[in-house]
Image (tube, rainbow, N blue to C red):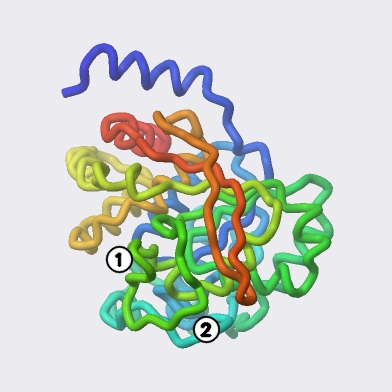
Amino acid sequence: MFSIRQILCYLILVIICPTTIANPIIIDTDLGPDDWQAITYIFAQPGVNVKVITIEADGENDCKQGYPKLLTFLKNTNHQNIPVACGNDKPLRGHHHFPKNWHLEDKGFFGITVPKEFKQAQLPRNTASKLIINTLSKSKKPLTIIALGPMTNLAQSIRENRQIFLKKVKSIYATTSGFNQLDFTKKHDDIYIGELRASWNIYIDPLAAAIVFNTPVKLYINMPQAQQNLSIKPVYLALRETHNRNYYQNLVFLILQNTLQDLFVGDQLTALLWHRPDICQVKLVKPIQFILNGKRKSRLATQCLSVSQDIFTQSFLNRLK
């Protein structure tokens, strides 16, 4: 049960917190279970303006696995007009990859039927960076990027046209945690780099992350401290008791029903911080360090260190309605 104080705090957040949905966004994702929950949350917001979605094919799902499911999702939510592209299926440097059993290749789309035409659709391979730069070039407003996977597509976009990227990208909200003082020049066989545990998204393509960090674009990240006391299970339990679930509620419920062993909350929290940044109870602007081309560099990033489980759960559930 929630206390009266917690309920009042949440209502204040809902009423007075500035919303960012009017700003156009780009979603860059590898379409893992937590990504799908974050994307579903984003699409459930009235007036959301998603310009494009790009698939990080070197992440949990490659283009063949993820593209038909994404087309299905867009059709079911009446957003077929949103362009989709896939990036390279290899990182910029090295051969890091997610565990094979994390891939959803043989597990379907959480029980949702994928139309035959989508399964047979021509795959837009290696087109992500071009779509990002083209979208930025044509946009009259600066865009926000919500980065839910490895940053290979973003780094390739910077390499392709750094000037446009810096001019048109307002901010990046990223699921990248636990990477302070990482040495990106060393080779590693697991996700432990230096003395800290690197996030999977950093581990897969550390060079791409360093290229993105090496820009002055505003960076917002949620740190391990903010995630360690959070669980997505209360969301599942609440949805299980919800009758006549709408599409967004039902999709999150089906995802969690099929992946209860995967309780990551990083991407869901990133989506919440984009939409309701004030749910972060402890937020600091701190430097992060990285190495690029053999040189140690540092930049400032806004880091979320603490979020209440109650506010996380209620924020996520209430905005799926």
Give the quarter of the image for residue 246. Answer: top left
Give the number of marks: 2
41 or 143, which is in the foreground? 143
Left or right: 33 with respect to 233?
right
The vertical placement of 215 against 124, above or below, is above
Instruction: Determine the residue positioned at 76% across, 74% down.
Output: 160
The vertical placement of 119 against 202, above or below, is below
Instruction: Determine the residue positioned at 30% across, 18% down.
Output: 7
Query: Residue 20 appears at what percent x and percent y?
Result: 60, 36
Instruction: Determine the residue positioned at 80% across, 69% down.
Output: 161
Left or right: 241 with respect to 188?
left
Query: Residue 9 appears at what percent x and percent y?
Result: 36, 17
Specify few, some or many for label 1: CA neighbours under 10 Å numbering under 14, 14-19, or 20 or more: some
- Regarding residue 272, the answer to whether it shows in the image is yes
Position of the C terminus by quadrant: top left
Of the residues shown, which amino acid type is indicated by label 1?
Phe
| Element type where label 2 sits in the image | loop
The circle on residue 261 is: none
The circle on residue 110 is: 1
Query: Residue 202 appears at what percent x and percent y?
Result: 46, 67
Specify few, some or many for label 2: CA neighbours under 10 Å numbering under 14, 14-19, or 20 or more: some
Query: Which residue is the site of mark 2?
Result: 89
Instruction: Report how far apart the C-alphas of labels 2 and 1 lie in the structure.
Output: 23 Å
Of the residues shown, which amino acid type is indicated by label 2?
Asp
| Element type where label 1 sits in the image | loop
